Amino acid sequence: MRNKILAEALIEALPYIEKFSGKIIVIKYGGSVMTDAELKVSFARDVALLKHLGLRIIIVHGGGNEITTLAEQLHIPTEFIAGRRITDEKIMDIVKMVLAGKLNKEIVCNLNRQNAKAIGLSGQDGNLLKCRKYFLETGEDIGWVGEIVNVQRDILLDILDDGFVPVIAPIGYDDEGNSYNINADSAAGSIAAAFPAEKLIYLSDVPGILLDGERVASLTQEKATAMIASGQISKGMIPKVNSAFDTLHQGVKKVHMLDGRILHSVLVEIYTTLGIGTQFYLDTHS
Ligand SMILES: Nc1ncnc2c1ncn2[C@@H]1O[C@H](COP(=O)(O)OP(=O)(O)OP(=O)(O)O)[C@@H](O)[C@H]1O
Ligand SMILES: [Mg+2]
């Protein structure tokens, strides 16, 4: 019985293996999925498998919770507006320490232990992510928060060609020597759009976009705009949803948000017909 189930799963996957071989998929890795011991190992194994199945994987990671924890330990207050962290000089230092220093290396080591061949870099390495200052829609200045104006995608293509998985900490630079804290979802979206990638997957620690506690399987831009206006989409979900639609407008065909707490959710999304998480659509689809 088990043989039959396994064989059927592989046969179901075959057209997707053919379809995605050689294609670029960007995974935004965030939330508690990054810190739970079992999920960490499972994620790394899945990435190794995807790589061996011919996918070209790029990982962009967040780390909002860890930045808040270290800031609290250092008695430095942190504040958010519309899901974006107000970033003064002190917070910017903490962002660099946590993202580029600690988490990026942890993720790379975790992937390498499962033979996923990962290499870590921040958006400042090789001038990967050039930024300008990001202002809220209200025009409010929230400090060293960056908006990406250029992705040096050739660096990523070289790393991929060498058989490595680039793991990117979302910190940017400008020509004046400033550092920027970039929302990791926005960074993943800009990086996916720069190719454009075949698919962008946000791996988070919720079942998908929730409306009254229920998962929304397909979310159109119109519905998302209304949910943000009414407060049904809030906090860190606002930049995620906005960058999902920006990325679709820039030519990435599929943008998905998955529950990273469910083991192998990325494999299931890519290689089966099961509809899990939330898929973002520009318009109502048939
Ligand atoms: N409608 C919604 N559906 C689901 N989650 C929502 C919704 N509105 C707000 N949220 C919040 O958004 C959070 C996810 O965004 P958050 O930025 O905290 O995580 P992340 O992007 O996965 O991690 P990181 O920012 O560390 O990369 C959820 O944990 C939830 O609290
Ligand atoms: Mg977030």
Image (tube, rainbow, N blue to C red):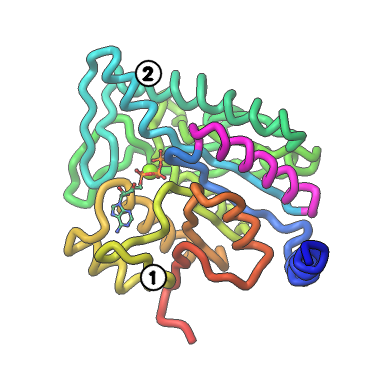
Sort mark 1 into few (<14), some (14-19) or many (20+) by Cα contacts within 10 Å.
some
Measured as percent of width and height from the top left, residue 35 is found at: 49, 32
Q: Residue furthest front?
A: 1
> Which amino acid, by three-letter code, is at mark 2?
Asp
Measured as percent of width and height from the top left, residue 139 is found at: 19, 46
Name which quarter of the figure residue 104 lies in: top right
Q: Is residue 267 above or below residue 129?
A: below
Of badges 1 and 2, nearer the viewer stands 1
Sort mark 2 into few (<14), some (14-19) or many (20+) by Cα contacts within 10 Å.
few
Magenta segment, prevailing SS (helix, strand or loop)? helix
Q: Is residue 49 visible to us here? A: yes
Q: Residue at x 75, y 40 (%)?
A: 158
Task: List the residue tagged with mark 2.
Answer: 93
- Region rendered in magenta: 34-54
Q: Are marks 1 and 2 in contact (CB under 8 Å)?
A: no
49 falls in the magenta region: yes
Q: Mark 1 falls on what kind of element? A: strand
State which tag comes first along the sequence, 1 or 2.
Answer: 2
Measured as percent of width and height from the top left, residue 129 is found at: 52, 37
Q: Residue at x 44, y 67 (%)?
A: 280
Residue 219: numbered disc: 1
137 falls in the magenta region: no
Q: Nearer the viewer, residue 225 or 88?
A: 225
Total marks in image: 2
Mark 1–mark 2 distance (CA, rounded to whole Å): 36 Å
Q: Residue at x 39, y 27 (%)?
A: 66
Q: Is residue 284 above or below residue 135?
A: below
Q: Is residue 14 visible to us here? A: no
Figure quadrant of the N terminus: bottom right
